[in-house]
Image: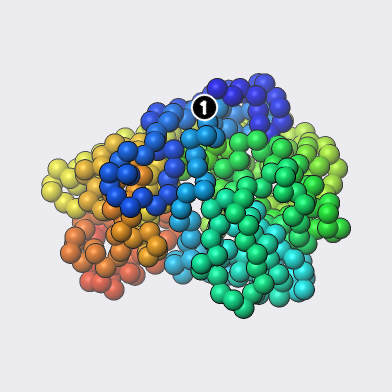
Amino acid sequence: MIDECQACGGTATEPFFQINRIPTSSCVLTDTPEDAARWGRADLELAVCHTCGFIQNRLFRSELVDYTMPYEESQAFSPRFVAFQDELISRLASDHDLAGKTILEIGSGKGAFLEAICRVGGARGIGIDPAGQSSRLTTDVDITLIRDVFDESNTHLTGDLICCRHTLEHIQAVGRFVRNVGDSLRRTPGSVSFFELPDTERILEEGAFWDVYYEHCSYFTMTSLSHLFPSHGLSITRLERGFDDQYLLLEAKEGPAVGSSDQHGVKELVEQCRRFGEVASREVDRWRQVITEFAARDQTVVLWGAGSKAVGFLSALALDEAVSAVVDVNPFKQSTFLPGSAHEIVSPDSLQDLSPDLVVVMNPIYVAEIGEMLAGRGLHPRLASLSAVYR
């Protein structure tokens, strides 16, 4: 158990939410239902720091998560996500005049984002990821992918723009990680870092238990980020919400090593954390009742979106048999199996045979495009998201 805050080193941390025996990975690809069902499980307990507002899983054990295994993180098969990413890339390329410069991406995965921003910005790219794969890259962009973790041994890697998207929440020692990014920034005068990560304040407000899973050992809000980066030598130049307020977008450069003094914001955040358990419990009960009622009438329930949210949702509800299928548009996920529940991930076309009565969308931002895909296949089930019922 880790009681010391991994962001500021404080010892005034307060536990507020626990969930037991959840899969230790939620984006891995397993080839058989047996492997998926046998996937390792562990306990999670979230605690909030009274000094800086950082939230961490104090039961997290890094040795239980293997990031060298094949996983599928791409959302590039969703028009809604592609539109968001294209707009983001256009802004970064324009704001930072990337032509002829170098972009380093920490946690680059298969290099899709890095390739896209290098192409738009006219830059060369370096990506580092323990499970990095170059098989999906084209040959018209100068990109080097390195299969490794980013730590003190790799701070010689640098760029005019250093990107880190949906990686910081997987890092336990976040203070040390931010200092390492600062070391990389200092190797290129004028370099800027860009971070994209989930907004935990939304999770707390919605009681979004489906967004709490084992790999995410660290959880951030504007309040905690405003303390974390300056206290480890980086000055925040931009901090905002994006993607329908689901993500936090942060830019920082080398700056003063001072922390935020917003203790009022920290106190409010601590109160939000204390309320989260009650709100999450009501959400679990609500969704358990909805799905149980459909199953009791022999009606077919499917989930749309075979990612971490689906694993978290199914783990908390423990109603695996009441859900007939898990659907995803990403062809690289199809015919593999979801860790824990062992549901096979199927294509949207398979729904014509299943003829679902209820489709639960794991992310409400995709409801409109999923509704169109269903209607295009002659299907008109009740369509719901994890925040509301739409029709």
**Is there any visible trace of residue 13 in the rendered image?**
yes
* Residue at which label 1 appears: 59
Residue lying at 54% horizontally and 35% vertically, measured from the top left: 62
In screen coordinates, is 122 left or right of 378?
right
Q: Where's residue 270, x and y in %?
A: 60, 29
Q: Is residue 82 above or below residue 291?
A: below
Residue lying at 42% horizontally and 45% vertically, measured from the top left: 26
- Quadrant of the drawing holding the N terminus: top right
Q: Where's residue 345, x and y in %?
A: 31, 56
Q: Quadrant of residue 138?
A: bottom right
Badge 1 marks a residue whose secondary structure is loop
Q: Where's residue 338, x and y in %?
A: 34, 48
Residue lying at 26% horizontally and 68% vertically, measured from the top left: 349
Q: Is residue 40 above or below residue 13?
A: below
Q: Is residue 357 above or below residue 10?
A: below
Q: Which of 337 and 356 is in front in this view?
A: 337
In screen coordinates, is 1 left or right of 338?
right
Q: Nearer the viewer, residue 279 or 98?
A: 98
Q: What residue type is labelled 1?
A: Leu
